[in-house]
Structure formats: C-alpha cells, structure tokens
Image: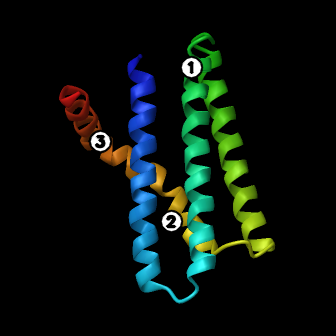
Amino acid sequence: MNSADNTVKELAAGIIVYGILAQIICLVVTDNTLSVAVGLWIGIATALGMMIHMKRSIEDALDFGEEGAPKHMRKTYVIRLFVVAVVFGVTAYFQVGNIIAALIGVMSLKISAYLQPWTHRVFVRLQKSK
C-alpha cells in the first residue's frame, strides 16, 4: 500500500475522530441536538468527499504537464468550493441541519490535516503491534 493511501486513511480517521468529539460536545452544549447532529455529519461527509476529491485531483495533476497541472488544480479547487457552497445552500434552504454545525464539520478536514502527523504515529504504532 502506498503512502498516499495511508495518508488518506490517516486523514479520514482524523476527520471521523473529530466528528465524534464534536458530536459529544454538541450534545452537551446545544439544545437542538438533532439539527446540530445532522448539520455536523453533513459537514463531516462533505469533508470526507473533499479529501477524496483532492487526492484524485493531485493524482490527475501529475499526468498533466508543468502548464496543465496548475490549471487542473485551480479547476478542481473551484469545483470543491462550488460543491461546498451547494451543500451549505441546500442544508440552509431545506433546513436539513444546522449550517454552523455543517461548517464545523467541514473544518474537520483542516483540523485533520494539522493532526495528521500525530495520527500517522498512531497508525505506525498500531501496525507495529500487529
């Protein structure tokens, strides 16, 4: 298994752990727990989708030349931003979940990226114990 796949697994684990911790905090802090929970997990699912899309975008960009790769990365970045805006818009318009909680869920991707060196060490220790 290559290191990109390991990194994706580590990021996904970080996103999920962040989601669980955020869910526990939201259960304690908020009154409208169902709306907040749905919003949070919409954001978490969006973050997971963004992570997968970023991995594929980077892999695809490697096939383009020096000129094509930056253009491809900009295009895929705009696509991700558009999808997040649509997800937030649908969440708010149909009042499916709390939009602030959805934003907190999407931010799990950023938090997971910062915590990835730590999750990497955890994964390495788990591999050694097997």
Side (left or right) of 30 relative to 93: left
Q: Which mark is residue 104?
A: 2
SS for callout 2: helix
Q: Write down the residue under mark 1.
A: 59
Q: Amino acid at mark 3?
A: Thr
Q: Position of residue 47 (x, y in %)?
A: 56, 50
Side (left or right) of 15 relative to 98: left
> Are dots 1 and 2 in contact, CB under 8 Å?
no
Q: Write down the residue under mark 3.
A: 119
Mark 3 nearby-residue class (10 Å; few <14, some 14–19, many ≥20): many
Q: Quadrant of the N terminus?
A: top left
Q: How many numbered circles are shown?
A: 3
The residue located at (29%, 42%) in the rendering is 119
Q: Quadrant of the C terminus?
A: top left
Tell us which disc is closer to us: 3 or 2.
Answer: 3
When the figure is inspected, residue 14 is found, relative to residue 72, above or below; the finding is below
The residue located at (50%, 65%) in the rendering is 104
Q: Earlier in the sequence, mark 3 or mark 2?
A: 2
Q: Quote the CA–CA distance across marks 3 and 2.
A: 20 Å
The residue located at (49%, 57%) in the rendering is 107
Residue 8 or residue 60, whichever sits in front: 8
Q: Quote the CA–CA distance across marks 1 and 2.
A: 28 Å
Seen as rendered, the residue at the extreme bottom is: 31
When the figure is inspected, residue 124 is found, relative to residue 89, above or below; the finding is above
SS for callout 3: helix
Q: Amino acid at mark 1?
A: Glu
The residue located at (43%, 62%) in the rendering is 20
